[in-house]
Amino acid sequence: MVELQYLLDRSEKQLEGVHATIANKAIELVKKAYNKGIAIAVTQGYRSIEYQNSLYAIGRFGNSGKKVTNAKGGSSYHNFGLAFDFCVFDDNKQPVWDGKEYSIIGQMGKDMGLEWGGDFKSIKDKPHFQITFGLTLSQLQAGKRPAGSATPTPVKKSNLLEKGASGFTVKDLQEKLIKLGYAIGKVDSEFGKLTDEAVRKFQKDNCLDADGIAGKATLAKIDELVKALTNTPTQAIKVEKAPATETKAEVIKAPPTPQKTTSGDDKVKSIQSRLNTQYATKLDVDGLYGKATKQALVKALQTELNKQYNAKLKVDGAFGKATKAKCPTVRKGAKGDITYVIQAALTCLGYDANGLDGMYGAGLEKAVKQFQKAKGLSADGIVGKDTFEKLLG
Ligand SMILES: [Zn+2]
């Protein structure tokens, strides 16, 4: 019989990313089966949705081969780390895909609280176990998770998330880096050369030690920026009707003298960093508002006009006639990435835009009025084509 340690090692490798409760049961099952004289190992645990789609494509869409699965990405419990497959091994470490052993193991797993694929109504899947925790696939697809899912199995090779590491935590890191616009090749759960380069670049862009180790500070920064990305509403510029009459005569204070930022401003740094991650603008994150940052803001605006208004502009960072013509009217109540660009431009010019949250509130309106007054525009607090031009042209 094959050595137990071989089966355990093989299994553990496959269980990265599998829910801890299920992973522990899988290991227990391998041991129990071994005690009964059956050599099994886990052959598959967590499958990324992308990988599942590539499996689904085998034997379909004109691809060669026999169909291997009926599950598209996201429609298998494997995609959520809630399932594993096992295989019986003969004395020569060769897999045996058939035999009465499968039913014996099936019963053994069920006694341990696992759901067995051999009991499936439609397509029986004897090498498959899962625990759904009462969650349907649509609930999982919608983002629901059982308790404990967030606990990834530890990366074994190195405690540090650096070159040479592998596993679920690397995969998570790679996916986040891609979201932030860093090229890492493909998500393969292996911390190789490209991931190393991307981490160093990210660190450099964000004024962190560029050591290639995704430690606490780096991961915190990555999470912060990913969160900022997902929390940013991308659509919905609310265009309200202009009030018929201006009822309250508002006192508009004199505009502030825009400070020349020589030492590098933290707010400008955060703007540069966000432009880099969201619009791949490759700015130096130095906190200095110069030509490059202004062009990057224009690129952001052009990108959003294309995305939200199908403006079909060339994203060149130059605020020309075509861009001006496509600028919408943005006023109090609006929210989204275009409002963010307005806030960012005003902030870079030294105005207090009352945050960088993409929300057009009273604070931003006030800053717009101050800016308009300073530029000789009618100070209505509404950003139209002329105000856009003064801001970014
Ligand atoms: Zn399976």
Image (cartoon, rainbow, N blue to C red):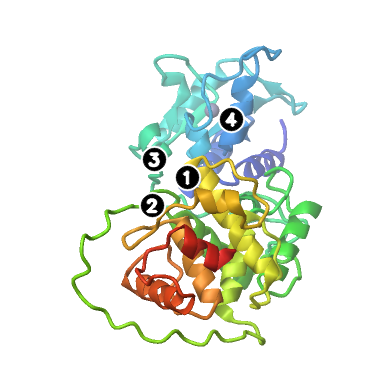
Q: Where is residue 35 in the image (x, y as percent from the top left)?
A: 58, 35
Residue reaching furthest to the left: 247
| Position above or below: 43 against 264 | above
The kind of residue on which mark 2 rests is Ile
Q: Residue 389: which quarter of the image?
A: bottom right
Element at label 2? loop
Residue hosting label 3: 142
User: Upstream in the sequence, badge 4 or badge 1?
Assistant: 4
Q: Which residue is drawn at 43% across and 34% down?
A: 114
User: Upstream in the sequence, badge 1 or badge 3?
Assistant: 3
Q: Which residue is drawn at 72% across and 50% down?
A: 183
Q: Where is residue 359 in the image (x, y as percent from the top left)?
A: 38, 63
**In 3D space, how far apart are the residues under numbered discs 1 and 3 (Cα atoms)?**
25 Å
Q: Residue at x 71, y 24 (%)?
A: 90
Q: Is residue 46 left or right of residue 336?
A: right
- Which residue is more in the foreground, 393 or 239? 393
Cβ atoms under marks 2 and 1 closer than 8 Å: yes
The kind of residue on which mark 4 rests is Gln
**In 3D space, how far apart are the residues under numbered discs 3 and 2 (Cα atoms)?**
26 Å
**In 3D space, how far apart are the residues under numbered discs 2 and 4 (Cα atoms)?**
37 Å
Q: Which residue is drawn at 65% across and 71% down?
A: 206
Residue hosting label 2: 237
The kind of residue on which mark 1 rests is Gln
User: Upstream in the sequence, badge 2 or badge 4?
Assistant: 4
Q: Where is residue 319 in the image (x, y as percent from the top left)?
A: 61, 57
The kind of residue on which mark 3 rests is Ala
Where ligand 1 lies, by quadrant?
top right
Is residue 173 at all visible to an observer of this figure? no
Residue hosting label 1: 308
